[in-house]
Image: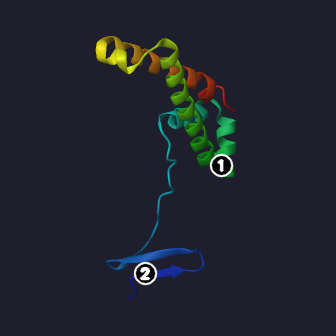
Amino acid sequence: MEQFIHDETNGLDYELVGDYYLPCLKAPDSPKVGRFGMMYHNYLRNHKRVAYSGLLLSGKLKGHIEDIDRQAEDLFSQLVEQIKQAEGVSKQLKAENQMAWVGAINNILNRANEIVIKELICNNQ
C-alpha cells in the first residue's frame, strides 16, 4: 500500500496511518496580529457583526485586521514619541529620578493606548 495517495474527486491528499488512510488536513493560517489587531477583531465580531460577516465571507478579514493592526502600532509609536517630547520626558529624567520617569512613561503609554483604541479600533468601519 502506498504511504500517500491523492483523491481526484475531492482534491484531498491522504496518508496511510496503520490500516487506514487519513486526510492530510492543515488548519488555516491565523492572522499575524498584535494586541490592537486582536482588539479590533473582537470589536468587529461582537459589535459590528454585519461588517465582520461581510469581510469574513469575502476573504478579506485577515488582511483588513492586519492592516488595522499595522496602522494602530504606527499611530501608537508616533503618539508615544510626540507626547514624550511635548512633556520633556527624556533619558536625563530617567538618570535623575527613575520613579518619576517610570510614572511619566506609564502615563504616556496609557494615554496613547486609549487614543489608538478610540480612534482606530472603535471608530473604524
Relative depth, front residue between 69 and 93: 93
- 61 relative to 88, above or below: below
**Residue 123 image point, x, y percent:** 66, 26
Question: Which residue sits at x=54%, y=24%?
Answer: 79
Relative depth, front residue between 107 and 46: 107
Q: Residues within 10 Å of mark 1 (few under 14, many from 20)?
A: few
The number of numbered discs placed on residues in the rendered structure image is 2
Image quarter in which the C terminus is found: top right
Relative depth, front residue between 22 and 124: 124
Q: Which residue is mark 2?
A: 4
- 40 relative to 13, above or below: above
To which quarter of the image does residue 71 belong?
top right
**Looking at numbered disc 1 in the image, what kind of residue is underneath it?**
Lys
To which quarter of the image does residue 67 belong?
top right
Q: Which residue is mark 1?
A: 60
- Give me the disc on residue 82: none
Relative depth, front residue between 115 and 55: 115
To which quarter of the image does residue 98 belong?
top left
For the question of whether residue 102 can be seen, the reply is no
**Residue 7 image point, x, y percent:** 54, 79
